Structure formats: C-alpha cells, structure tokens
Image (cartoon, grey):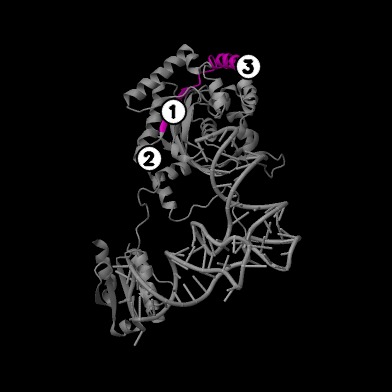
Amino acid sequence: MKITSIKGFSDIFPGEVETWQWVEQKVREIFTFYNFAEIRIPIVEKTELFSRSLGETTDIVEKEMYTFADQDAKGTLLTLRPEGTAGVVRAYVESEMFKIEAVRKLYYLGPMFRRERPQKGRLRQFHQIGAEALGRSDAFIDVEVLLLLSDFFSSVGLEGAELQLNSLGCEQCRPKYRERLLDFLKDHDVGLCGNCRRRMDRNPLRVLDCKEPGCGEETKNAPSILDSLCDPCREHFDLVQRLLWQADVRYDLNSRMVRGLDYYCRTTFEWKSSQLGSQSAIAAGGRYDGLVQELGGPAIAGVGFAMGIERLIMLLRMKENHAPAGPLVYVAWVSEKARGWAFPVVHRLRRQGVLVEMEGEARSLKSQMRRADKLRAPLVLILGDDELDKGIALLRDMTNKQQEEISLEKVEEVLMLRKAN
RNA sequence: GUGAGUGUAGCUCAACGGUUAGAGCACUGGACUGUGGCUCCAGGGGUUGAGGGUUCAAAUCCCUUCACUCACCCCA
C-alpha cells in the first residue's frame, strides 16, 4: 500500500515554491521597514493557551484543533497551533518583554493547523503571515497596521482586494448591543433559517452575516453595532476612519462583519477578494485589548492581523516569473572518460560561483542538447573522446549556434570570464 | 460533521454495455551514424482508484469503500 499525505496537508513543489520564497522575501522587506521584528514561536503549545484566548465555544476550539496528550506523567494536553496571535502574546508575557519595552511590533510566518474539511482556499495545514503590535491602544497604531498590509499588497502586486471595516465595541458597549440585537432577533425569529435560530443563543452577531437571502431580508432593520458604540469607542473608530481617509486607503464599512475569535474588540477588518471562491478572506484581524491580561500579563492592548499565504498566492497568479536562474553552462559528455574529466572541473567551477549543471546519465548527445535547451543554458560544454584526444573541449553558444574549440587547460578560465559578463 | 460532483497513461481528456481502452502534450529513439528549439515518423508507458455484484460480455449499470474537488458550517 502506497503511503500518501494526510488529507488537507499538501506538498509545495519546485515551480511553486519559488513564489513562496519571493513572497516571504517581500514580507521581510516590508515588515522590517515598518519596524516589525520577526518572532519565531513553537508550533505546539499547551491546549489551554488556545482555549483560553480564542474562547471555549469557538468552532476552532470546539472541534478543529489537533490535540494530543504529551508523554509525560500527567499527560499534558498539547495542540498544534491553529493561529499565531495566542502564541505571540504568550511569548510576550512569558518573557516579560513589556518590562523592558512596553511597545513591541512583531511579525511571524509559518504553518497553522485546523481540522476542517478541505476546500478551495482551505487546508488543514495552511500558512499564515501575521503581525501584532502590542502595547498601544490608540487608533494610530490600528491604522499603521492596516497601512502595513496595504503596502505589502501593493509590493507583491495584489489587486482587487477590498477592505471591510467594523468596530465591535468594548466590554462597556458590546454587551448592551448584544441585548438589543437579541431582542430584535427574538421578535423576528420566524423568518430566520434554522441555522440562524440556533446561532441566536451562541453568537447572535453571526445571524447578521448569514448568507440566506431570507435572513438578510429579515434583519434589514436590525440595530447596527456602529450605532451602539460608547463614546470612547466611537471616537476611536472615527479617528481610524479619518486616518485611513487621509492615507488614501479605501474601505467599506460593514457593521455585519463578525470575527471568529472571542478576543477581538473595537477595530476589526477583513481584506476580501471575489476571486478566491467561497473562502474569500485573504487577511483579517483587529484589536484585542483584553488578551494580554487574559494570558496573565498586565493590562496591555494589542492589534494585529493574519494573512493566508495560500490564498495570497492564488491571487498573485504567477504574474511574474520567480524561477531561479538556470545554469550558465551545461556539460554534455559522450564517454565515461569525458565524464571523469569533467566532474572535478564542474566542482571547481561551482566553488568559484559559476552555475554549472552536468548531465547525469549516459545518453545521446541529442537528448543532452535537448535537456540543455530546456534548462535554458546559454552555453554547452561538449566533451567526448575525440576532444580529449585533441586536448580540447567544444563550447557551444546556444543563442547564436556558434561553436568554438578551447583547450582543456583553458576551460575554467574561459567559463569564469563568461560568468563575469 | 453534512451535501453534491469527479476518479481512465506522468499531465489534460476521449471511448453506444460489444474487437487488442485511444488522442494531444510530455518522455525516449530515428529522419540528422556526435549537436537543441521547427517538422515528420516510430516507440515505451494502463490492474480504467480499490473490492464485490448484475450480464454471454463492464471503463460504462448496481452496491460498498477510498481518494480528490466544490459547497454548507466556519474561517486566513
């Protein structure tokens, strides 16, 4: 029986991996420019970290986490991280970073795991790029984070992503809004789909972004969270919008946008694209002012986002060719003696920085030429017994079909020269 | 977890229940005895996802199972 990969876990092969490397390079460039520093955190954490920060009743915690017992005596429950924010905040609190410098701007990049049914734009192991700004509660940092994302998108040439913006309020105003909404929904529950009637108790906000047309109709006049914000939240959100406007970043207000994790408050946002299929969010995030404290730290605010790399790459559509440079010289050999002569030469050339590839098996010269052509090598060094006897090698220029004889002693020298050009 | 769709050569796909399951691309070789792209010719490559059933006969129909895809749920 052939062993296959796990459902929802995929390989990234050469050809595609170059695009990943290019994206990662852009991340480092842009994020560093905004003074975000990379942090690398473990892929496995204690289960409790996630259940406490994401919320016990979220889908992720209830049914999507890869959780297992450690081999220690207590059988400590461990979980493959389903997202990055919890781990970053844990590291921030645990290392007491805030004592030295309360404000930290961090980013990370790596695999996340959620046991969902795979579909377009959704895998069980997927990759996220995330940024977290800890220690500031002002609207300016919310917008700085949004501008970072926006600049990143333009640096990779992403077009057609739309920003949706909302505010979820704080512990003061959100519970009040929740009550108001619930009252409204109770009066209208006849027109709601079965799904939404179930949603009412668990997370009434979610009823608002139900895809059923009937539910949309029924909740058309539902109270909006944006009309229910308390004064500080209102001012915060107004400033966010004013700054975005100033920075020329377009957005749509969406008071029905819900975030999946419990820790969000105030500003939340989502970048969406219509070209992604049903899973349309490419990046999403928001403010999480209570999280640091929830994880045992001081009352320190935070704001951040996560972006799905697979989804991002789907949208980039390989506009640019990120393939690495092919070999400068392809060495074709037609006898074992020639191969034996060429092998150490190839090695020496590589050590001197010349990109050389050499045929690996005894094949016709024709097929070796084909291979060289396919690799787009501009030069082919041809070696056979005839040449060795004469003390020469043939150097063919693939672009103009010119071929010259060079003495064996000069091969390295000549190729070094070609490299320089 | 629920629902639908699809599984045939390395890839993209054909084949009314009826000869030996084909084509394009890719690969290998030849035309060009040791020279790439274009063209022409030839060749290799398949347990038709797996297992069972119906039938004189199954890639084709039925059942089971597995995998993939898309959607719901939910989310990056």
Q: Amino acid at mark 2?
A: Leu
Q: Quadrant of residue B49?
A: bottom right
The dot on residue A186 is: 3
Q: Is the residue marked by circle 3 packed among few (<14), some (14-19), or many (20+) residues within 10 Å?
A: few
> Of the residues tagged 3 and 2, which is closer to the observer?
3
* Image quarter of the C terminus of chain A: bottom left
The residue wearing badge 1 is: A164
The residue under the point 57% across, 25% down is: A214
Is A68 contained in the magenta span?
A: no
The residue wearing badge 2 is: A158
Q: Which residues are magenta?
A: A162-185
For mark 2, name the chain: A
Q: Earlier in the sequence, mark 2 or mark 1?
A: 2
Q: Earlier in the sequence, mark 3 or mark 2?
A: 2
Q: Earlier in the sequence, mark 1 or mark 3?
A: 1
Is A172 contained in the magenta span?
A: yes
* Image quarter of the N terminus of chain A: bottom right
Q: Is residue A186 left or right of residue A356?
A: right
Foreground of the two, A59 or A141:
A59
Residue B7: x %, y % from top left: 58, 57
Residue A183: x %, y % from top left: 60, 14
The residue under the point 48% across, 24% down is: A301
